[in-house]
Amino acid sequence: MRLLLLSDIHANYAALEAVLNDAHGEFDRAWVLGDTVGYGADPSECIAAVRDLDALAISGNHEEAVIGRMSTDDFNPVARAAIEWTASVIDDDEREYLQGLELKQVVDRFTLVHGSPRDPVWEYMQTGPQAVENLEHFDTQACALGHSHVPFLVQVTADGVAEQVEHSPGQRVPLGDDRLYLNPGSVGQPRDHDQRASYALLDTDAWDVEFRRAEYDVAVAQAHIREAGLPEFLAERLSMGV
Ligand code: ZN
């Protein structure tokens, strides 16, 4: 099975469209790892595209806040403004779709979460010790996650050492036998100083992954953000990749 891994689309339809064009014909199923909405100005278009893909999607912290399952008090003012705007523009059907998303899904050798297995909503997986500590919070060999907006593959060896696996766009990286964490990066708001949309193609038969970057028209996403009256920083950060 060839899987398209998307995370943190963040209501950036220009970026999502570029990714779908780039990956066209190369996947059988899509997994969407949360934060489809928030920050950007195209929540309805992005929800529709994810539904059209018939993707297995999970809920992220932005969905949880938009549907009111989590307080916006825990968000910074810029994120909160976008969450409140999003909640005001999506329709009942879209809200119902978001309400139906789970925080965790298990599929074959993968557990899908937004943040981390022990705290699907809030934890940012950024260090080796976190990767090791989280192993007891899921049963599958692998975990697919997002939230940090930085693409990575981390393997934890049998003797408990977490190692980042080097990868470059377009290269197929074997996943091996160790337990692992796979983050495809962010489609709609990359934070690794590369403004291009980030995603991954996972082949569960070959058991390898390919990280990819897709160029998109950043100015279009920025114009939508400004037209919606969202905070200027949300537009600016897209061209900086932060
Ligand atoms: Zn996010």
Image (tube, helix red, strand yellow):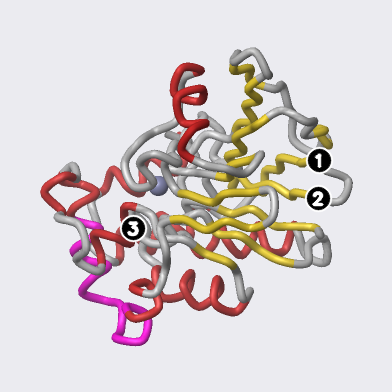
Residue 88 falls within the magenta-colored stretch:
yes
Q: Which secondary structure type mostly characterizes the magenta part of the structure? A: helix
In what element is the residue under mark 3? loop
The relative height of residue 180 versus residue 127 in the rendered view (above or below) is below
Q: Which residue is mark 1?
A: 208
The residue carrying pointer 3 sits among few (fewer than 14), some (14 to 19) or many (20 or more) residues within 10 Å by Cα, namely many
Q: Nearer the viewer, residue 226 or 207?
A: 207
Residue 170 falls within the magenta-colored stretch:
no
The residue carrying pointer 1 sits among few (fewer than 14), some (14 to 19) or many (20 or more) residues within 10 Å by Cα, namely some
Could you tell me the amino acid type at mark 1? Asp
Q: CA distance from mark 2 to mark 3?
A: 29 Å
Could you tell me the amino acid type at mark 2? Asp
Disc 2 to disc 1: CB gap under 8 Å: yes
Q: Which residue is mark 2?
A: 203
Earlier residue among tags 2 and 1: 2
Is 130 left or right of 19, judged from the image as shown? left
Q: Is residue 196 visible?
A: no
Measured as percent of width and height from the top left, residue 86 is found at: 27, 67
Q: Nearer the viewer, residue 84 or 238?
A: 84
Nearer the camera: disc 2 or disc 3? 2
In what element is the residue under mark 2? strand
